[in-house]
Structure formats: structure tokens, C-alpha cells
Amino acid sequence: MMAQSAVADVTPAEVWADFKGYMEGYGYAVSATETDTGDTLTVTDITMTVPLPEEEGTMTMTMSEMVFAADGGAVDVSWPAEMPVALNIEADGETVDIGLLYKSDGHQMTVSGDPNATQWDFSAASLAVALDGITVEGETLGPDVARGEVVLGDVASTTSMATDEMRNFEQSMTIGALTYDIAAQDPDNAESNLLMKGSMAGVNYGGSGALPMEFDPEDPAAIFQGGFAVNGTFSFESGESQLNFVDRSDAFSYQSSSAGGEGAVTMDAKAWGYDYLMRNLDLQLSGSEIPFPVALKAAEFGGAVLVPVGKTEDAQDVALGLNLTDFEMNDIIWQIFDPGAQLARDPATIKVDLTGKAKMLFDLFDPEQAEMMARADMPAEVYELTLNNLMVKAVGAMLTGSGAFTFDNSDLETFGGMPKPTGEINAELTGANALIDKLIAMGLLPEEEAMGFRMMMSMFAVPAGDDVLTSKIEINEQGHVLANGQRIQ
């Protein structure tokens, strides 16, 4: 297949037709002036119009020129180094015109393969999109009211697309540096303004998926019903961001930096999933609604979620995760509830890793079923839950645990409407009694409440060392609940 692709030819007209068909498949009406000289196709005055969802109006985008030139069986695609792009949005009886300036330096795009299996190779020393004016109902807003620019440096990407009943694609991209600088001001109030700035370095993206050849733009859910599926991974080496907002006496400021991270996303008609992780996160907050500056740090900050969204015959994977490692906060926060520094201020850690199996009983993409689900007592059936890891370490105490349960959805009587679980969970708690003593001494925990906590721990846990408690909670096939071998229900 690779050898055949290498020797196959694609023409300028076929590449333009593929691009045009791609946009038309997603509801855009595309018009342009085409000048074909055989080896070169020049397309000018490109206009693409698409209706907004729920008949809210239309959006029209215009581009000045694209040139498709034959190059030994492949096609080189080019455009001006500075190309104005106009957006015209008509919604709710108002007309908004947005001017953008697309700037590229040292860009090169080559399309090879054949009409049904193309590869798009692209590189550029830099790319930039800058706001070039906004007009609302005939009134033009100057750069003092709104400005913005996004710049990408050292860009390279490869996209392979194959079309049959679906448009299947694989893509990889690297970006050496990414920066953005956006500012806006209320035209009627110079004391109300917003500033957003940030940058990322060493950005990498890779993904694949399948897109329906066409769908109804008035029904966004139709794209999933038509077979849409995508998964991708993203990483970066470092990043920082800044947000400042002022509205007369109200103000808010946010700053953050990190030593990189990664993320992943998966979406199809059955399930949606997302996970992310940031390293060496440093975050600072201040504002008129915040009584003092807040400074937070974490060696790692991340999370994960995977949920089924479509009705299926078989149970699907589910997941939920949280990772907050070596979390620290500034002394001003500590002073509020621990002015005497009696509590251990070592970095805190919270980790949760939960996976399982569940089956949706309704299809979220069907409006009628989604409405029924909102009224249903049980929108889904849970079959398995596994606590792979639990760790909570803070103020001198630490709780760890793991375990797994299965659920019998045919038995809703044993546990009063809940599917009967079977399984066990094991936990260990260290430093709890010392922490309770400190909370009593600080006046944060009354003696009688502390006694209640200690009695509860003695019921569900057994000593395993100096201020160490362990607990094994079981639910057997008979529906009996046992704590460390003793039946409690």
C-alpha cells in the first residue's frame, strides 16, 4: 500500500475538490473563482458559509487566494504570506464582522497520494493569526478596545486521510513555541478590561479518527450518530499563563507556570474520555473577592474521566482519577486555622484511581432518551468498581486503600434499591490519633466529637502498630457486611 501511494498521482483539481468536499460535507456552502492553467489551479475569492445551530443565524468566512500547483505527481499548496480572513456573523438580529490577518513565514504544504488516500505534509517557520478589527452593527471597535494575536513557531505536521464510507485520518504535529496575547476593553467603560497572555514550548500532538462524509449542521449530535470517533494525545515541555481582569472596583489576577505535561482525549458515540497531568505547577491568585493573595504549588496535578454516553448491549469501561502530589500552600492560608503551627506542614498528596464497568440505559445523543434519562431512577447499571489506589497524606496522617466490588443488578432488594455488591476493600490509616489530639488542642475539634471518631475507628479498624490502624471491609455473597471478619450488618 505504501509503494502504491508513493507512485500514485494527485492533481491540483482533485486536491481542491477534496478540500471543498470536506467543507461541504460539514454543512458549508463553498463558492470561489477557479482559474485552471493545467498544472496550476488558482482559487480566489473563497467564501464559506455555514448556518449556526438552532437557527441562530449564519457565519461566513472569506479568504483571498489559494494556489494548487502540480509537482511531479504531488501538489504544492500555497497562499499569500499575509492573507486577510473575514468572518461575518449574523445572529439574533445583529451583524458582527471580524477581521483576521493570517500571517505565515517559510510555509510549505505538499499533498501526495491519490484522490482517495492523500498525505498532507506541512511546515512553517512561523504562523500567526491576529485580530484585524471588529465591527458591530456598523460601529468599528479600535485596537484600544480589542486586540489579539496567536503565534506558532517552528511548526511541522503530517496528516494522512483516506476516504470511503468515512473520512479516516491520522495526524502528528510538533510546535516549537506557542504564544498568545489577547486584550479587550468595554467600549462604554475604560475601567473595565481583560488581559490574557501565555506561552507553551515543545508542543507535540498525535491523533487518529473517523469523520462522517457529511452531517446535518443543525443537529450537532448527528456527527456522533454518523460514526464520528477520535482519539489523540498532547504534550508540552513548559508553559505559563496570565489573566488580569478589572471592572471598576472589582479585580482578579491569575498567574501560573509549569514544567510541562501531557493529556489525552477519546470521543465516540459510546464513550468520552479525558485525562491530563501537569508537572511542577505554580499558581498565584489575587483579587477584590479574595481577602489575601493565594499561592499554590504541586509537583503533579492531574485527573482522568471516562464515561459511557451511548446505549450499548455490553458494559463499557468507566474511570475516574485524581492526582495531586506534593501540594503546598502559602503560610497566609495556614495562619488562618493554624496560627501556632501545630499541624505538620509537609506537602500533601491526594491520589485516587478508580476503574470499572457500567452500561448506559439511555442514549445521550437522542433528545427523547436524554429527557427520559433525566427522569429515570437509574440511568445506568454499574457492574464492576475497582479502587486501584487511594492515598490521602496531609497534616501528619496518611490513609491508603485498594479493593474491588462486583454488582448484581438483578438484586435490588438486599441493599434497598441498590444493586447488591460483592467484594472487599482494604485500608490503612497512620497518624490519626495524633492528629485528633492536635485538633483538640487547637480547639478545632470538641472532646466529645473526638470520642465519637475514635469509637468509629475502633468499630471498623484494628491496631497494627504505633498509631497505625488497618481495616478490611467485606460484603459476601449472602449480602453480609463484615469489618475485619466481624459481621456488622
Image (cartoon, helix red, strand yellow):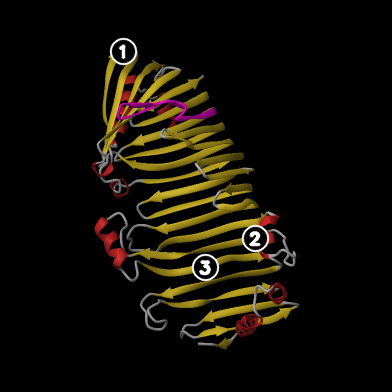
The amino acid pointed to by label 2 is Thr
Which residue occupies the foreground of this view, 78 or 179? 179
- Foreground: disc 2 or disc 3: 2
- Foreground: disc 1 or disc 2: 2
- Foreground: disc 3 or disc 1: 3
Location of residue 54 in the rendering, given as x and y in whole percent from the top left corner: 25, 44
Q: Earlier in the sequence, mark 2 or mark 3?
A: 2
Residue closest to the far top: 37
**Tag 3 and tag 1, C-beta contact below 8 Å:** no
Q: Secondary structure at mark 2?
A: strand
Which residue occupies the foreground of this view, 236 or 452? 452
Residue 76 part of the magenta-drawn span: no
Q: Secondary structure at mark 3?
A: strand
Q: Which residue is mark 2?
A: 349
The amino acid pointed to by label 1 is Gly
Which residue occupies the foreground of this view, 240 or 113? 240
Residue 134 in view (yes/no): yes
Q: Which residue is mark 1?
A: 38
